[in-house]
Image (tube, helix red, strand yellow):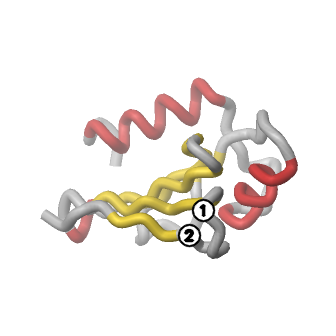
Amino acid sequence: MKLPTVKHPTDRPNFSVVTLNAAEDRELWLAFSYETCVGFMRPAWDKWVVRYNEWGPTTGKHMNLLNNDHADRWNEEEFRWMLEGMLTGDAE
């Protein structure tokens, strides 16, 4: 098993992408604005799953870097349900 990694795509510590590596084919990327998970993705996917912006303009910029389509955003309950499924293996 690979250890988790953290990257700062904007070279600023307030936006991070954490890579979880259960196995090479099950890698999961988690995007954080400050301390809040705002998106997730598997490398094989063509886009990020992103929450609605309930915070401020800086978090909005981070979310737009992941997916600029505001019509393709999820509310907290839906986002949490999908992410929990990815983390527990109940969804693939």
Q: What x and y, as percent, mark residue 10?
A: 66, 73
Q: Nearer the observer, disc 1 or disc 2?
A: 1
Label 1: element kind: loop
Q: How would you rate the neighbour count of disc 1 (Cα within 10 Å): few for under 14, some for 14-19, many for 20 or more?
A: few
- Residue type indicated by callout 1: Pro
- Which disc number belongs to residue 35? none
Of 65 and 57, nearer the camera is 57
Q: Is residue 67 above or below residue 91?
A: below
* CA gap, disc 1 and disc 2: 6 Å
Q: What x and y, as percent, mark residue 45?
A: 48, 66
* Residue receiving disc 2: 8
* Mark positioned earlier in the residue sequence (1 or 2): 2
Q: Quadrant of the N terminus?
A: bottom left
Q: How would you rate the neighbour count of disc 2 (Cα within 10 Å): few for under 14, some for 14-19, many for 20 or more?
A: some
Query: Residue sitting at 35 percent across and 66 percent down?
Result: 5
**Circles 1 and 2: CB distance less than 8 Å?**
yes
Q: Quadrant of residue 61?
A: bottom right
Query: Residue sitting at 48 percent across and 70 percent down?
Result: 7
Left or right of 31? Residue 10 is right
- Residue type indicated by callout 2: His
